[in-house]
Image (spheres, coloured by chain):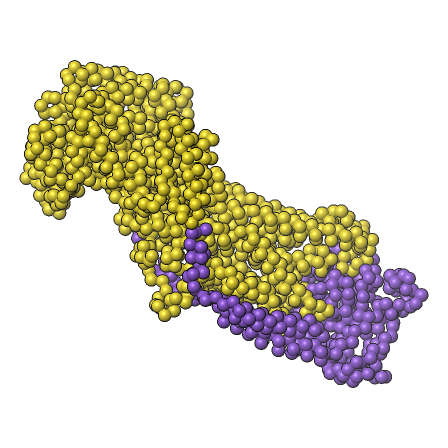
């Protein structure tokens, strides 16, 4: 089955390629519609008439090379083995040999029965839990029973329980929504020949289903018939890919005419797969020849039927086999760098654990060896048991075994050295952090009303350590809202767009005024030329130019009512924002596209309504980089309009004609792209009757071909698109998003390198680079755009020597910018030149890659990721960014105009590029700081406890007694000390948002691993040993030679440990709010209460011990002495380093505290945007 | 738009923040909490604070240390190791045989000189060295249910290896701890007057009231082949067997004292106390020491200089640190919150 998701499609063309035009499908039966009587749909209900388009996304027309549909589609028919046979309207036979999945869906992971085993199975994927489970199991062996069974299971059970409750709740919610979904009803053809309601879950493959307007489709169906006589149906796929525009699907003529109850036939289709833009099948309809079915004949579950009163289809994929279900994948799972580092320290701790256990074991062995003759005389050992009829040894298996046991027992006792609660704490902390990121109103996009989304929950802290940002351009840096700016018609540049008509050009239809939804400023000179003010030739050229803009596209006009009854707005719907802009521009110049059906286009040409027949259409593909349409004009001429990228268009223009115009157009194009505009070239050719006939027959042959249809169509298109006359070129502006230059500047200051990877032309990329302050005038630009491997190599070597020369120049070093294009990257990536490129690129401050393909984007990310330890972040919005988003350590999707594929693949999603600044500089910094501290603290906290236990073991004849009651040991890491670190991990802030935004350089703390590194770990562990010594030896020495009992001293130790570690935490808290106070002091109080409760149980040996202890002054003096003695080294070191070796964060904290003293009482003013400070 | 199909299509990310496009469109509500702007105090370790804290600790600790030392000095303590002395000279070669031989009378007399005046109450302890009452095997060998409730006499779980007699009837109190009950006895005479030792109230009241039953009587105790320590009066309920109660509060450390009784009489310096003791308890098999301790008490308990010295050391150290910090701050001052110290301001070219 198709393993790759369509979103990761590597061959998808770059979205920000200006020449990516809508992929107008042209499996249209163009010739037939040419002959068929035209129907003008009743404009009352829907004026949105369009011609067939098969698909919508760039990927659509060109599914992945690896995907089944493509392979099968262009090469061969589906073999019987790979096919699913669907007998239309005969579910019984369809499901005969094997029953297909029914239509019920299950997004839940668990059922009541499977919840426990499955959830546990999943949780035990965590090695640490297996470790704790093994230890709990070992503990059940009588010889090793260190804890009572209940106590030994409790911590693990607690941790597993918390996670299980969380998972269970989430699953229950899914369960509920599944149930609602499964019980919805749909109209299904019953044997009697009428449609009866049936629950969704009962729908079977092969059944005929009727869906009416605005209903959701219950399963994947092949269209049989629709309310539209031509078989057209419109669906909205927002639930599938997030695109809100309408997509056209159509029923085959062969089935369209048959009444639903008598339809029969056999559909052979491919097995269920994930490709939502591919479908391959053929249908044998009785009495007709075999017809082939493609993606445009299938409507998918989750879509909604729009503008079509009903459709009838046959269910081919149901339930879990539907494409939407196959595509619902969980959030990507990544592991944060901090966690990876943490595992290194966990291993160190494990080594320490083994060391401690070995020490105990050796000592115990020696002790036993020394005493093994007298064991029975030791009153406290007495190995013989005289209870039974014959004398037996009790629980003694010889020195060797006892030594082994004492090793195992010591592992059980010291097991908390590996902090069990850390994993669950980290999960909870990340949940809390995610909550605050989602809630941050500075990351709420007012425009699209979307808030921040955390899709991955494992990598919050990675946001604080990013060193490279790889950004897409269109839709990420820019808004992807195209505005027509200037045109070059016949080589003349018309870019002086004035304010023109503010309310836009409008037309009158049946007494109603129709006006395009968006107005475009017009250039008076061009207007003049169009009106014939500059001669008939120019006027004709301009007319053809705008005619081309209005026709050569796949835009569907939709009428929108306004409060005024006589005024209607025309909303041009289409997948390509470029095309929309062009159609709006044409409308502004008087060429208003009014209607589009599969066969004709209705255009209001300056007040005069004209009808153009669509004779053929060559869809866009990334090889040709152009699309064309063949139009039958009212004057019986046949014209071919082509538009496409400049380099592809200039290859097919008539070279010997209009040389001046070609030259002038090229000059204009260059200046447009230098302004950062996206350019398109428009050309045309008139077809003679003979040429048209020839084309038509070839086209018909191709469309009916079963083998290699796509290739044939491509060849026909290339054959037709030649010897073009240049009409002109257009320049479309893609506006920068708000705050992009400031965001990039902030990131640069923060030490983050921003690389822009775009499909745009070099000039466009550079100009965008300037406008978003990525490039500055003092930068030295290194441009690599070579066409061969040798020249690439040379250029790279030049660049390397240049950068080293500049670096050698010392202080007067000017920053470097590397600009490289996709063609050069072909020769560099995955060859030995990669290393060279890496060296050059890392010395450059800015890298711009233009004309790159999606897979190259991922390749560039990998270039950095594989060679350095630096964290990478990729941000993009389109399907072509998916590979890069998945490759980078952190992937961010912009939930913008281009569907949701990027979002679906991302770890975080947000509305605007500029939110990267609060995300990285503020939340990232906080999250990293918090998580780093929390991990270290958890290590420290558990190690202190273990060391205290260890010291005591040395005074118990190495018999692994613990003075601290077992319940206290068990509760230590889950109750006594867990909450404060979680609260601090979620809420503590070393610096305020304002300071972090004011000094982006503070972000470098994370890049330098300042808060978590081996050195800090070792220091913490040394401190931890000292503290454990203070905790253990102060009471030990104070109570030496006294009548203190085990439990009493144990209570003192546990209280001392808990208070000390909480005070340690308290000392490191940056910001004390009431929650922090409540959790830290509350935890100490809870510990005291727990100890008191434990000591109030008469069954336990420690009954009442705590009260007897607390009644003595010695107890309190010991406690105070422990706390002070334990904290002095840390406090002194902290005071010294903060004063004499202050980190940037420390200085900024002081700044925050002392500069605001007289400034304002409110320290943190809620800010509207991040750009306020600076 | 039906949200259910949206969520069906969406992944199940842990945040519960699925991918249904409509669900994220809610504007976050503003509150100080959600924007992480709760009013908070931001302590910073300024020199003033650091010096004050150290000084304060010093000011508190030094007097406490002095008081603790004084208290410890005022405690008068007589410690007498008798296990080596109370062996007839001819038996020193085989102490274990001596102690295990029931036929030998083990009475022994010791004379103790009171070094300083001792005010009542004078606590009489026995001290055992090298006796691991905290051994894992040992501390577990008891059954608390049996001690409290007469109906639970059969409950001997956990008491191994001293659970039942050979014929299987339960031992009350069972377990190694009770079995090894200390059985040396002491009698004190001052001059020719008997110094009475009050053995009432030497155990915790909580133990007498709630842990040891008043209707539980010893059964089958010390009847086994191997005799551990003292026998119990089978007519006295457990809650009145205070020596047992004290003994069963297992000591935390291998060298420990247990309260034997109290003498309610003042002793003068150079008084000579004659102790007649019965040296029954076998510590010889593991080189344990036995000591008799007479001690007065202070508010800090017995004689122990450690805490006083520790407090003085910590206090002194804090004073030292306070002065050191002061000097260092004066010698090398740094203006707090000076942006010119920021790393990127110190070397403007970045890093």
Q: Residue A24 appears at what percent x and percent y?
A: 24, 29
Mark yes or no: residue A1041 visible.
yes
Position of residue A659 relative to residue A1063, above or below, is above
The foreground one among A548 and A299 is: A548
Q: Residue A1165 appears at what percent x and percent y?
A: 33, 62
Which image quarter holds the N terminus of chain A? top left
Residue drawn at x 28%, y 38% is A764
Splitting the image into 4 quarters, where does residue B250 fall? Answer: bottom right
Q: Is residue A1164 left or right of residue A713?
A: right
The foreground one among A125 and A913 is: A913
Position of residue B7 relative to residue A202, above or below, is below
Q: Colour of chain A?
A: yellow
Position of residue A704 relative to residue A740, above or below, is above
Splitting the image into 4 quarters, where does residue A1144 fall? Answer: bottom left
Mark yes or no: residue B239 visible.
no
Q: Residue A498 appears at what percent x and percent y?
A: 14, 43
The residue positioned farthest toward the right in the image shown: B90
Which image quarter holds the C terminus of chain A? bottom left
The foreground one among B12 and A592 is: A592
Splitting the image into 4 quarters, where does residue B162 fall? Answer: bottom right
Position of residue A980 relative to residue A668, above or below, is below
Q: Is residue A712 left or right of residue A1132?
A: left
The foreground one among A466 and A804 is: A804
Residue drawn at x 73%, y 53% is A363
| Chain in purple (letter) | B
Residue drawn at x 91%, y 62% is B93
């Amino acid at each position: 089955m198709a393993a790759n998701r369509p979103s990761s499609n590597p061959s998808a063309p770059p979205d920000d390629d200006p020449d990516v035009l809508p992929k107008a499908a042209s499996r249209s039966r163009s010739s037939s519609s040419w002959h068929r009587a035209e129907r003008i749909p009743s404009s009352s209900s829907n004026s949105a008439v369009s011609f067939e388009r098969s698909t919508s996304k760039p990927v659509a027309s060109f599914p992945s090379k690896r995907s089944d549909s493509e392979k099968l589609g262009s090469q061969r028919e589906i073999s019987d083995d790979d096919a699913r046979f669907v007998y239309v309207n005969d579910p019984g036979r369809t499901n005969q040999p094997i029953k297909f999945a029914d239509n019920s869906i299950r997004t839940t992971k668990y059922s009541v029965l499977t919840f426990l085993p499955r959830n546990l199975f999943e949780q035990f994927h965590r090695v640490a839990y297996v470790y704790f489970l093994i230890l709990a199991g070992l503990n059940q062996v009588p010889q090793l029973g260190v804890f009572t069974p209940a106590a030994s299971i409790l911590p693990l059970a607690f941790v597993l329980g918390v996670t299980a409750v969380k998972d269970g709740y989430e699953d229950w919610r899914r369960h509920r929504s599944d149930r609602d979904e499964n019980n919805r009803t749909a109209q299904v053809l019953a044997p009697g020949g009428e449609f009866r309601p049936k629950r969704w879950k009962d729908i079977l493959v092969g059944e005929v289903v009727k869906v009416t307007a605005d209903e959701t489709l219950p399963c994947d169906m092949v269209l049989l018939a629709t309310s539209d006589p031509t078989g057209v149906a419109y669906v909205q796929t927002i639930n599938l890919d997030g695109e809100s525009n309408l997509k056209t699907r159509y029923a085959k003529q062969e089935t369209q005419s048959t009444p639903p109850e008598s339809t029969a036939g056999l559909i052979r289709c491919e097995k269920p797969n994930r490709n939502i833009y591919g479908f391959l099948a053929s249908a044998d309809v009785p009495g007709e020849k075999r017809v082939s079915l493609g993606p445009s004949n299938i409507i998918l579950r989750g879509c909604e039927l729009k503008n079509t009163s009903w459709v009838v289809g046959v269910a081919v994929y149901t339930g879990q086999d539907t494409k939407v279900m196959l595509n619902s994948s969980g959030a990507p799972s990544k592991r944060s760098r901090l966690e990876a580092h943490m595992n290194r320290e966990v291993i160190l701790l494990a080594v320490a654990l083994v060391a401690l256990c070995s020490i105990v074991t050796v000592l115990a062995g020696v002790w036993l060896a020394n005493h093994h003759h007298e064991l029975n005389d030791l009153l406290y050992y007495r190995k013989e048991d005289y209870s039974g009829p014959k004398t037996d040894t009790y629980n003694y298996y010889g020195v060797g075994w006892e030594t082994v046991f004492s090793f195992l027992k010591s592992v059980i006792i010291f097991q908390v050295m590996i902090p069990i609660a850390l994993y669950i704490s980290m999960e909870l902390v990340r949940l809390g952090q995610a909550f605050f990121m989602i809630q941050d109103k500075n990351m709420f996009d007012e425009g699209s009303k979307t808030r921040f989304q955390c899709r991955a929950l494992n990598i919050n802290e990675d946001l604080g350590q990013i060193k490279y940002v790889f950004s897409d351009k269109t839709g990420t840096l820019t808004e992807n809202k195209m505005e027509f700016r200037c045109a070059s018609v016949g080589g003349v540049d018309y870019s002086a767009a004035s304010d023109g008509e503010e309310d836009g050009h409008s037309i009158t239809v049946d007494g109603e005024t129709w006006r395009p939804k968006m107005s475009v400023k017009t250039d008076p000179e061009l207007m003049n030329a169009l009106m014939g003010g500059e001669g008939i030739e120019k006027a004709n050229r301009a007319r053809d130019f705008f005619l081309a803009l209005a026709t050569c596209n796949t835009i569907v006009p939709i009428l929108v009512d306004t409060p005024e009854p006589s005024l209607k707005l025309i909303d041009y719907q289409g997948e390509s924002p470029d095309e929309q802009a062009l159609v709006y521009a044409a409308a502004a110049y008087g060429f208003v596209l009014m209607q589009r059906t599969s066969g004709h286009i209705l255009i209001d040409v300056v007040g005069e309504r004209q009808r153009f027949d669509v004779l053929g259409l060559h869809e866009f593909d990334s090889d040709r980089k152009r699309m064309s349409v063949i139009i039958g004009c009212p004057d019986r001429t046949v014209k071919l309009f082509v538009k496409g990228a400049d380099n592809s268009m200039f290859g097919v223009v008539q070279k010997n004609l209009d040389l001046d115009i070609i030259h002038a157009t090229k000059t204009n194009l260059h200046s447009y792209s230098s302004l950062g505009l996206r350019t398109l070239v428009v050309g045309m050719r008139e077809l003679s009757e003979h040429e048209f006939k020839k084309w038509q027959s070839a086209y018909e042959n191709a469309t009916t071909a079963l083998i290699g249809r796509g290739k044939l169509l491509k060849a026909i298109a290339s054959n037709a698109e030649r010897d073009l006359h240049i009409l002109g070129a257009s320049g479309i502006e893609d506006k920068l998003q708000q705050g992009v230059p400031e965001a990039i500047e902030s990131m640069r200051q923060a030490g983050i390198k921003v690389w822009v990877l775009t499909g745009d032309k070099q000039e466009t990329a550079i100009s965008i680079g300037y406008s978003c302050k990525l490039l500055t005038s003092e930068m030295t630009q290194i441009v690599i755009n070579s066409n061969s491997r040798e020249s690439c190599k040379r250029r790279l070597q030049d660049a390397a020597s240049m950068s080293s020369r500049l670096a050698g120049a010392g202080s007067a070093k000017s920053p470097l910018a590397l600009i490289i294009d996709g063609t050069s990257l072909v020769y560099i990536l995955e060859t030995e030149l990669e290393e060279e490129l890496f060296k050059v690129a890392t010395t450059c401050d800015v890298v711009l890659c233009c004309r790159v393909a999606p897979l190259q984007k991922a390749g560039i990310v990998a270039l950095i990721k594989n060679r350095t330890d630096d964290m990478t972040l990729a941000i993009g919005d389109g399907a072509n960014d998916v590979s890069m988003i998945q490759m980078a350590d952190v992937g961010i999707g912009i939930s913008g105009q281009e569907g949701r594929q990027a979002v679906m693949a991302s770890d975080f999603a947000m509305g605007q590029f500029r939110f990267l600044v609060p995300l990285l500089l503020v939340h990232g910094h906080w999250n990293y700081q918090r998580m780093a501290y929390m991990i270290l603290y958890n290590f420290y906290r558990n190690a202190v406890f273990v060391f205290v236990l260890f010291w005591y073991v040395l005074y118990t004849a190495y018999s692994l007694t613990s003075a601290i009651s077992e319940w206290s040991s068990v509760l230590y890491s889950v109750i006594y000390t867990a909450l404060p670190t979680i609260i601090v991990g979620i809420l503590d802030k070393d610096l305020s948002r304002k300071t972090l935004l004011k000094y982006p350089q503070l972000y470098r703390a994370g890049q330098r691993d300042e808060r978590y590194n081996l050195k800090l770990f070792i220091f913490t562990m040394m401190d931890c040993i000292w503290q454990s010594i203070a905790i253990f030896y102060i009471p030990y020495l104070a109570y030496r030679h006294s009548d203190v009992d085990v439990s009493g001293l144990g209570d003192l130790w546990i209280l001392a440990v808990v208070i000390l570690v909480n005070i340690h935490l308290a000392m490191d808290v940056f910001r004390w709010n009431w929650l922090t106070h409540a959790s830290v002091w509350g935890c100490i109080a809870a510990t005291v209460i727990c100890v008191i409760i434990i000591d109030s149980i008469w069954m336990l040996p420690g009954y009442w011990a705590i009260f007897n202890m607390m009644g003595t002054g010695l107890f309190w003096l010991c406690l105070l002495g422990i706390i002070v003695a334990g904290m002095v080294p840390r406090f002194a070191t902290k005071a010294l380093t903060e004063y004499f070796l202050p980190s940037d964060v420390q200085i900024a904290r002081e700044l925050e505290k002392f500069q605001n003293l007289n400034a304002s009482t409110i320290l943190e003013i809620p800010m509207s945007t991040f750009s306020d400070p600076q | 738009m039906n949200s259910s199909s949206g969520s069906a299509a969406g992944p199940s990310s842990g945040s519960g923040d699925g991918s249904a496009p409509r669900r994220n469109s809610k504007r976050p509500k503003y509150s100080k909490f959600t924007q992480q702007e709760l009013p908070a105090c931001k302590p910073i370790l300024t020199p003033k604070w650091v010096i004050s804290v150290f000084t304060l600790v010093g000011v508190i600790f030094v007097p406490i240390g002095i008081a603790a030392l004084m208290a410890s000095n005022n405690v008068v303590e007589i410690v007498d190791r008798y296990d080596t002395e109370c062996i007839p000279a001819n038996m020193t070669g085989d102490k274990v045989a001596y102690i295990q031989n029931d036929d030998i009378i083990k009475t022994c007399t010791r004379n103790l000189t009171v070094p300083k005046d001792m005010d009542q109450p004078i606590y009489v302890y026995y001290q055992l060295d090298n006796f691991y009452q905290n051994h894992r095997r040992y501390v577990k060998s008891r059954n608390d249910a049996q001690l409290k409730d007469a109906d639970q006499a059969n409950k001997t779980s956990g008491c191994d290896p001293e659970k039942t007699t050979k014929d299987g009837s339960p031992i009350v109190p069972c377990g190694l701890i009770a079995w090894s009950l200390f059985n040396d006895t002491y009698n004190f005479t001052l001059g020719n007057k008997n110094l009475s030792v009050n053995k009432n109230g030497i155990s915790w009241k909580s133990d007498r009231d709630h842990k040891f039953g008043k209707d539980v009587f010893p059964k089958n105790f010390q009847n086994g082949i191997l005799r551990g320590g003292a026998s119990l009066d089978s007519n006295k309920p457990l809650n009145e067997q205070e020596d047992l109660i004290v003994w069963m509060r297992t000591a935390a450390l291998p060298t420990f004292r247990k309260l034997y009784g109290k003498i309610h009489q003042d002793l003068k310096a150079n008084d000579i106390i004659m102790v007649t003791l019965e040296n029954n308890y076998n510590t010889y098999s593991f080189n344990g020491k036995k000591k008799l301790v007479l001690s007065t008490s202070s508010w800090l308990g017995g004689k122990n200089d450690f805490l006083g010295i520790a407090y003085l050391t910590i206090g002194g150290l804090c004073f030292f640190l306070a002065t050191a910090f002061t000097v260092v701050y004066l010698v090398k001052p740094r203006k707090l919150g000076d942006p010119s110290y920021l790393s990127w301001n110190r070397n403007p070219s970045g890093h």
